[in-house]
């Protein structure tokens, strides 16, 4: 379901919007590379099926799959590069403290379309090699602070060029676990809790997502084979234009042998142990890493104060969305 606030109009016209999007992507990319010590890597649009490399998201989304005449096999468009990146770090001989970043484009055919969701996904997918001593919440939190710092640097350059934009990004981050959030707002749904905490603190990182809470539910779905559910989280900002919590990044310290073994059992996914990627992980053949995805269109929505993701990316929309946006004066790219 989409909704556009009464009286909404974009603060930038189409020409300036395109220029501003380019500026955001260039400035943020460079700032993040500097803050996290990342190097650009070329990324695949699709990967071979039945290898376990594709991101399974919540385990129910269908990848776009097609046959390849030359190989006789099948490939599927990536949902994200959560697993591919870890393989790449091993193949490209990255060492502790260095990481890679890719310009990732994906198709999520089963996505529910609304103000924040599209079947087209564009994000910065990044991954960094860490040591065993780095697998802790303090390291995770410090990485989140560096990401927010890159966003603030981008915001400052953007608003200097376009002073009509007056969005505020709060530097101080509220860190809270999903269980602490449930304890704080037991009567609310997970999404309602996110709104409540983000409305209060504006910049929030919700940690430990994937496992069941005391209530017996999970805060949000997570595949069992990339993030360690005890060392991950979502970065959210208050989006004043829509009066909503806007998730900009999902990230975490990745599974090691023990956490992968545990989470595959909890998720009922023991069959994945026979896939190439999972065998390598369980045999200790892949480096320890931290990584995540940062939504490019989501960040542009936030900094440009846009009401619909279609204002900052070109995608395909249903007739209801197109007609509603036309009525509200929202131009979809």
Image: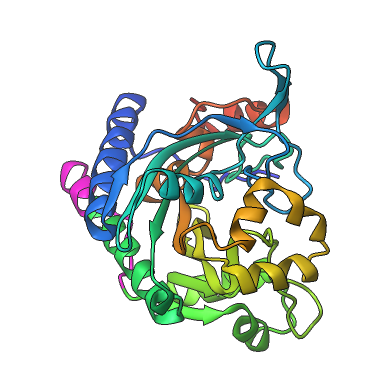
Residue 255: image location, x then y, percent: 57, 66
Residue 164 visible, this angle: no
Vertical position of residue 217 compared to residue 71: above or below: below
Quadrant containing the N terminus is: top right
The residue nearer to you, when weighing 23 against 188, is 23
Rendering quarter of residue 237? bottom left
Q: Is 164 in the magenta?
A: yes
Vertical position of residue 140 compared to residue 112: above or below: below
Q: Is residue 168 left or right of residue 61?
A: left
The residue nearer to you, when weighing 328 against 188, is 188
The residue nearer to you, when weighing 296 against 129, is 129
The residue nearer to you, when weighing 308 against 229, is 229
Q: Is residue 282 left or right of residue 146?
A: right
Vertical position of residue 22 compared to residue 247: above or below: above
Query: Which of the colour schemes (rainbow, by chain, secondary structure, one colour) is used?
Result: rainbow
Residue 295: image location, x then y, percent: 47, 47
Vertical position of residue 91 compared to residue 230: above or below: above
Give the prevailing secondary structure in the magenta stretch.
loop
- The residue shown at (32%, 57%) is 95
- The residue shown at (79%, 82%) is 215
Q: Residue furthest top?
A: 69
Q: Is 10 in the magenta?
A: no
- Give the residues drawn in magenta, as a range: 156-171
Residue 264: image location, x then y, percent: 74, 65
Residue 55 visible, this angle: yes
Q: Is residue 329 left or right of residue 279?
A: left
Q: Is residue 312 left or right of residue 16?
A: right
């Amino acid at each position: 379901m989409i909704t556009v606030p009464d009286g909404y109009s974009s603060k930038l016209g189409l020409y300036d919007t395109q220029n501003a999007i380019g500026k955001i992507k260039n400035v943020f990319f460079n700032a993040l590379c500097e803050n996290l010590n990342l190097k650009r890597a070329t990324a695949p649009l699709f990967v071979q099926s039945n290898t376990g490399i594709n991101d399974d998201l919540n385990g129910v989304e269908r990848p776009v799959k097609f046959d390849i005449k030359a190989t006789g096999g099948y490939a599927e468009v990536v949902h994200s590069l959560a697993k591919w990146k870890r393989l790449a770090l091993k193949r490209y001989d990255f060492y502790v403290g260095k990481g890679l970043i890719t310009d990732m484009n994906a198709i999520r055919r089963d996505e529910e379309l609304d103000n924040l969701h599209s079947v087209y996904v564009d994000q910065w997918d990044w991954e960094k090699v860490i040591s065993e001593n780095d697998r802790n919440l303090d390291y995770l939190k410090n990485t989140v602070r560096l990401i927010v710092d890159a966003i603030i640097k981008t915001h400052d350059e953007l608003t200097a060029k376009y002073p009509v934009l007056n969005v505020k990004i709060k530097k101080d981050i509220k860190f809270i676990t999903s269980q602490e959030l449930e304890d704080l707002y037991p009567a609310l749904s997970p999404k309602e809790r996110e709104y409540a905490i983000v409305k209060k603190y504006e910049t929030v990182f919700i940690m430990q997502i994937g496992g069941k809470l005391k209530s017996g539910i999970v805060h949000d779905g997570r595949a069992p084979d990339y993030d360690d559910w005890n060392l991950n989280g979502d970065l959210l900002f208050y989006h004043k234009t829509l009066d909503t919590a806007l998730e900009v990044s999902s990230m975490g310290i990745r599974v090691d042998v023990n956490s992968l073994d545990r989470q595959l059992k909890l998720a009922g996914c023991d069959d994945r142990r026979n896939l190439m990627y999972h065998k390598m992980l369980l045999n200790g053949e892949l480096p320890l890493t931290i990584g995540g995805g940062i939504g490019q269109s989501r960040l542009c929505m936030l900094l440009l104060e846009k009401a619909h993701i279609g204002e900052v990316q070109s995608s395909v929309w249903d007739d209801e969305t197109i007609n509603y946006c036309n009525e509200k004066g929202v131009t979809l790219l």
